[in-house]
Amino acid sequence: MLDEYEINSSTLAIIPVDDCNSKVMEEECEYLVKQSAAEIIDNSCKFFGSSFKGRSEGTKSLIGGNYKLPIVIEESRDIIFFPTASPKLNECYWISLNNLVDYQKDNKCSLVRFKNGTILNIDISIFSLENQVLRASRLENVLRKRKFN
């Protein structure tokens, strides 16, 4: 079990285990981390020079919205994560937009497939998941346009 973790370009998802621990999925392996998903997100933002609060405010100013906002963890490598629920809730997963290939409905849940072929079953409606993917993609698009203008 790791004491802490910084998100990187091979991070696929952060899955809460309980109030104080998370499972981190990477392309090649998985880790148990002694941090909540929210702590991993905030500490990773801080590692790259901001904070969760700062990144959230940045997202609000770029694409609008007030809740379940996607977050830019690191802008030079376009590392963007989006939440599956309110980040205040312990059951909130964080998913990497960059490593997501596709998703589909599975009864009342959704299946998410990543670049490495890993499939993750998430307790989120396909409508909510699609909305989160679209918001994160919109954020990515706004940032890309700003970089090249």
Image: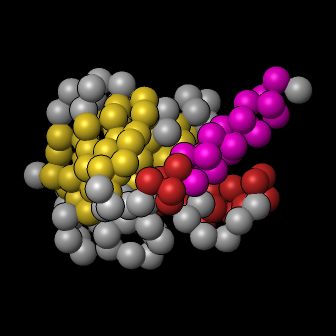
Residue 46 seen in this snapshot: no
Say if 1 sits above or below 144 in the image.
below
Q: Residue at x 20, y 71 (%)?
A: 18
Query: Between residues 116 and 5, which one lies in front from this camera angle?
Result: 116
- Residues drawn in magenta: 131-148
For residue 34, which quarter of the picture?
bottom left
Q: Residue at x 31, y 69 (%)?
A: 91
> Outermost residue, front direction?
107
Please check the rendered image and state whether residue 134 is part of the magenta-colored stretch, yes or no: yes
Secondary structure mostly seen in magenta is helix
Judge from the rendering whether residue 25 lies leftward or rightward of residue 133; answer left or right: left
Q: How many marks?
A: 0
Query: Between residues 105 and 130, which one lies in front from this camera angle?
Result: 105
Judge from the rendering whether residue 15 lies leftward or rightward of residue 77; answer left or right: left
Q: Residue at x 82, y 34 (%)?
A: 146
Q: Quadrant of the C terminus?
A: top right
Residue 2 locus on image (x, y percent): 17, 51
Query: Between residues 14 and 85, which one lies in front from this camera angle?
Result: 85
